[in-house]
Image: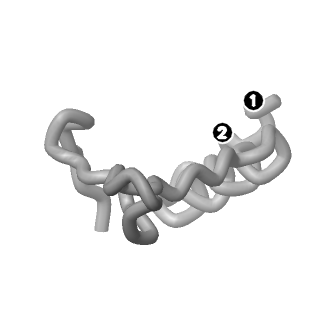
Amino acid sequence: MINVVAFHRLTLMYRGKNAAGKRNYITAPVSDDNLALIESRILHAIGLSSLTKHLK
């Protein structure tokens, strides 16, 4: 299933609060290789695997 979500509606995940009482958000960047793998898997899942050759 594919959904369209507005970015402003998303909530960042956090792991609690620090000593000052501010939330510590989880930030895990995705490498270029992993992003290309994710994109190719999505294209394959929706039946457009022939387009994977155009990914970098």
On residue 19, the disc is none
On residue 54, the disc is 1
**Colour basis:** one colour
Expressed as whole percent of the image width and height from the top left, the position of residue 20 reads 39, 51
Expressed as whole percent of the image width and height from the top left, the position of residue 46 reads 45, 59
Residue shown at 24%/48% (left/top)? 10
Residue position for label 2: 51
Expressed as whole percent of the image width and height from the top left, the position of residue 53 reads 79, 37
Q: Counting other residues with Cα less than 10 Å from the Cα at mark 2, is it few (<14), some (14-19), or many (20 or more)?
A: few
Q: Quadrant of residue 41?
A: bottom right
Under circle 2, the secondary element is helix
Residue shown at 45%/70% (left/top)? 15
Expressed as whole percent of the image width and height from the top left, the position of residue 45 reads 52, 65
Distance CA(mark 1)–CA(mark 2): 6 Å
Q: Observer-nearest residue: 27 or 7?
A: 27
Task: Quadrant for the N terminus, please.
Answer: bottom left
The amino acid type, in three-letter code, at marker 2 is: Leu
Under circle 1, the secondary element is helix
